[in-house]
Image: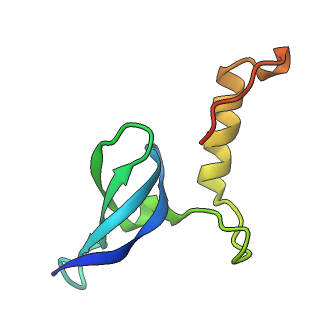
Amino acid sequence: MFTQLDPALPVFVEGKGKGLAHAVIDYGPEHNLIWVTAIDASGEIWCASNPKVRMQANWTMGRARSAAESAMIVKSRDACNCSKGETPMRL
């Protein structure tokens, strides 16, 4: 079953980054849901399985960053030598 999401949901895909989920594909009880997601940074469309997808942080709703999202932010700060005063990449 293919379900279009309206509105699209802001999600974080492990290994890809932030994006908007526009649809969900459900192949049945023996399979993970598949999230059809447009990645913000690259514009690529990826189909990610349910274990790789997390909702983005939302301060208003009291939802903190997932561990995967926090790890990606730390990794990007390390890559840009932020200890030398550089501005980290915004995720």
Residue placed at 48% from the left, 64% from the top?
A: 10
Vertical side of 18 occupied by 43: above or below: above
Could you say which quadrant of the image residue 5 lies in?
bottom left
Q: Position of residue 15 (x, y in %)?
A: 46, 43
Query: In the picture provided, is 67 more to the left or to the right than 7?
Result: right
Q: Position of residue 37 (x, y in %)?
A: 33, 57
Is the N terminus in the top left, top right, bottom left or bottom right quadrant? bottom left
Depth check, front residue: 23 or 33: 23
Could you say which quadrant of the image residue 74 lies in?
top right
Depth check, front residue: 28 or 8: 8
Vertical side of 45 occupied by 35: above or below: below
Residue placed at 74% from the left, 25% from the top?
A: 87
Is the C terminus in the top left, top right, bottom left or bottom right quadrant? top right
Query: In the picture provided, is 49 more to the left or to the right than 3?
Result: right
Residue placed at 43% from the left, 64% from the top?
A: 51
Q: How is the image coloured?
A: rainbow
